[in-house]
Amino acid sequence: MTHFFPGFFLVVLMIFVSCDTSNSENKNIIKKPPVERKANKSVIYKKEYIADSFDYPVGKPNAKGYYNAQKFGVNAHLGDDWNAVTGGNSDLGHPMYAVANGYVKFAEDIKGGWGKIIRIDHKLPDGQMVESFYAHCDEMFVQAGDWIKKGHKIGTIGNADGQYYAHLHFEMRSDTKLPIGGGYSENDEGYLDPTAFIKKHR
């Protein structure tokens, strides 16, 4: 019969506690998944990043070679769908651009029907905040925290990993604190007609 001495149990207990403490410390250094950055008072806009004019997100600056396949408000659509006039997936990988100077608050692949999304906050000369929203991207060339200028290439047009024909779903929002949303809704509070807004702020 094997005999265990009190000291043996003390050693085992110390090893167990030591391992448990190590795991707790490791948990503290694991990076948390990226979170959506909201516009807040801590984001200071220098003069050179004030959005004093807007261009189109494709075919810069005037959307040359593209058409608005599904406009804001049609079928409760909350944005504009930009497609190349050549149709199909011919615009897959085409560049898309920041519509104005601003601050990238979100750039992540959220999968599902949205795929890769970029959200940029813009401060207008009068202090008003608006957001531009770019979805179904194939590639993203910016990340949360980046400051960008109008016309900066922020990514390429995608198809949400093959779920649609390639196009850019583009939104403009007057409420920069809205959640990502679903792209369609009868309630368009906090959303702007993107094309009308850009035309007004050229």
Image: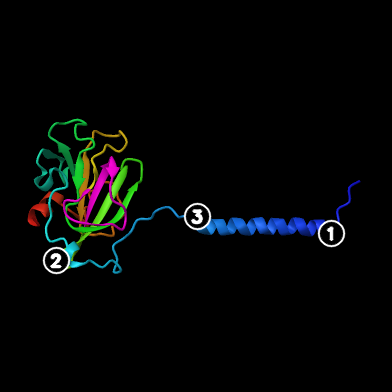
The residue beneath circle 1 is 6
Neighbourhood count class around disc 3 (C-alpha, 10 Å): few under 14, some 14–19, many 20 upward: few
Name the image quarter holding residue 16. bottom right
Closer to the camera, 130 or 12? Answer: 12
**Residue 139 seen in the figure:** yes
For badge 3, the amino acid type reads Ile
Closer to the camera, 44 or 117? Answer: 44
Tell me which numbered mark, 1 or 3, is placed earlier along the sequence. Answer: 1
Tell me which numbered mark, 2 or 1, is placed earlier along the sequence. Answer: 1
Tell me the distance, in whole angstroms, between the alpha carbons under discs 2 and 1: 76 Å
The residue beneath circle 2 is 125
Is residue 79 left or right of 182 when viewed as pictured? left
Tell me the distance, in whole angstroms, between the alpha carbons under discs 1 and 3: 37 Å
What segment carries the magenta color? 131-153
The quadrant of the picture occupied by the C terminus is bottom left
Tell me which numbered mark, 3 or 2, is placed earlier along the sequence. Answer: 3
| 141 within the magenta span | yes
Residue at the spot 26% in from the left edge and 45% down from the top edge: 135
For badge 1, the amino acid type reads Pro
Residue at the spot 19% in from the left edge and 31% down from the top edge: 90
Q: Which mark is residue 30?
A: 3
Q: Position of residue 63 (x, y in %)?
A: 11, 43
